[in-house]
Image: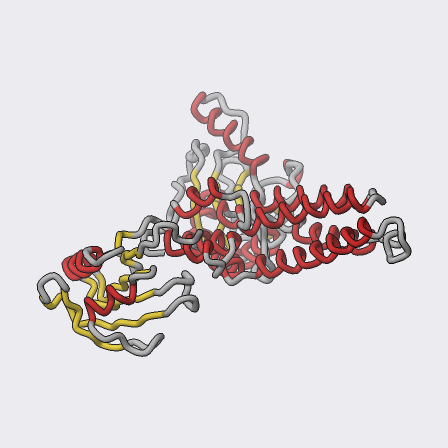
Amino acid sequence: MANPAGDTIVALSSGRLPAAIAVIRTSGPDALAAAQAVAGKLPTPRRASLRNLRDPRDAALIDRGLVIHFPAPDSSTGENIVEYQCHGSKAVVAALIAALVAQPGMRPAAPGEFTRRALANGRIDLTQAEGLAELLEAESEAQRKSALLRAEGALRSQIERWRGILLDLSAEAEVAIDYADEDEGGADYDPSDRLAAIIASFDTLLTTPRVERLRDGVRLVVAGPPNAGKSSLVNALAGEARAIVTPIAGTTRDLVEVNLAIAGIPVTLVDTAGLRDAQDEVEQIGIELAEREIYRADLLIRLGSSADQPAHPRVLLVASKADLRNDRAGLRLSVVNGEGVDNLKDWIVSQARDIIPSSEQPALNQREAGLLMSGRTALMRALTLTNPILVAEELRAARTALDTISGRSGVEDLLDALFGRFCLGK
């Protein structure tokens, strides 16, 4: 049940106070009655109207603000919603929320409860709720685009298409079971072509990069010998001095990590100690860390000689300090005059786009990918079977996997963790 307690919730839905404007949201069966008690006659649905906001307990004026309401079921939660736009002072917001909470059936919302009610009432599915969580946490343009695609229902639509196909196949399997001994189609039941097609469709999505890659970013490591210009390159990409630069060999001994976005793509840029045979114990530890980072890197920028190139699937040799010398292989680059910096960024972006999800198609998170793989396994088993009873059972297992992805079943424990990431008014 969407709202077993039958209660109405209220929370501040806008940003941190104080602010120019605050938005307070209520949702539930008593939202309209509470609004009438606080603001008087309500305006036409979905039309904002200026009202005196008063505390019904003593008729004291709290503020003058806009009131807009959305009747159930055509609201974001599927319930009656009323929103109040008032001045964004802490005192005003506190007084208005206190007046609303004092109304019958009203209580403060829990984190993410508005979105959870939207899920329970079928306004969104679990993939969209997870997309909203990702959108709230997005820090780069790529993260925003991917999260918005999921929040707007791109993955939900794909899952619904798959589910429709599986339901049709299941219905045909039931017919084949009922008429197994007759000439009504039981003997001709052969779903193999359509099973192969939906498995191929699963594979297309399963082979795309995971959503977590956007959250974690691309790990870009800069490595090479001492005094090759690694720290200067890191500072140039970061747009500020984040790593110490001196003429002294071995200046960088620890890892220096910088989080930034390049063309909207989240990148963790890692400066490392210069690679050489070192006698100093501290420097040797730094070199060991650098060698470890080389193998952890998604992308590797290697300064120095081409003879020292490590075996890495995405490595670029850079001929740094190109303003001083012109005798080395690799991408010519100078942080002094800017030569090659744009070309380096182009390489980073082109490589990163093969690692992170595209903003043009929905991507899976690890939970969804695991479930989709379970569904694929069931369909692969069905593909090898001829008994329609056994095929029907595997189709049911595949549908269950899709239903768990979308939140139709088996996700109560997950919901508590997911909506705990939301703010109170979302």
Q: What residue is shown at x 54% (from left), y 56% (from top)?
A: 345
Left/right placement of residue 313 relative to residue 335 reads right
- Quarter assignment of residue 9: bottom left
How are the residues colored? secondary structure
Q: x%, y% of residue 414?
A: 48, 42
Residue 50 lies, with reference to residue 144, above or below; the image says below
Closer-to-camera residue (24/231): 24
Residue at left offset 83%, top offset 43%: 385
Q: Position of residue 362 (x, y in %)?
A: 59, 57
Instruction: Say which of 174 and 276 sits in front.
Output: 174
How many numbered circles does the render carry?
0
Q: Residue at image x 30%, y 72%?
A: 68
Picture layout, residue 227 above or below residue 200: above
The one of 48 and 392 positioned closer to us in this rendering: 392
Quadrant of res 194: bottom right
Q: Quadrant for the C terminus, please.
A: bottom left
Residue toward you, 173 or 194: 173
Residue 86 on image: x %, y %: 21, 67
The answer to whether residue 265 is seen in the rendering is yes
x and y percent of residue 371 in the render? 62, 43
Residue at 31 percent across and 54 percent down: it is: 7
Would you say residue 236 is visible in this rendering? Answer: no
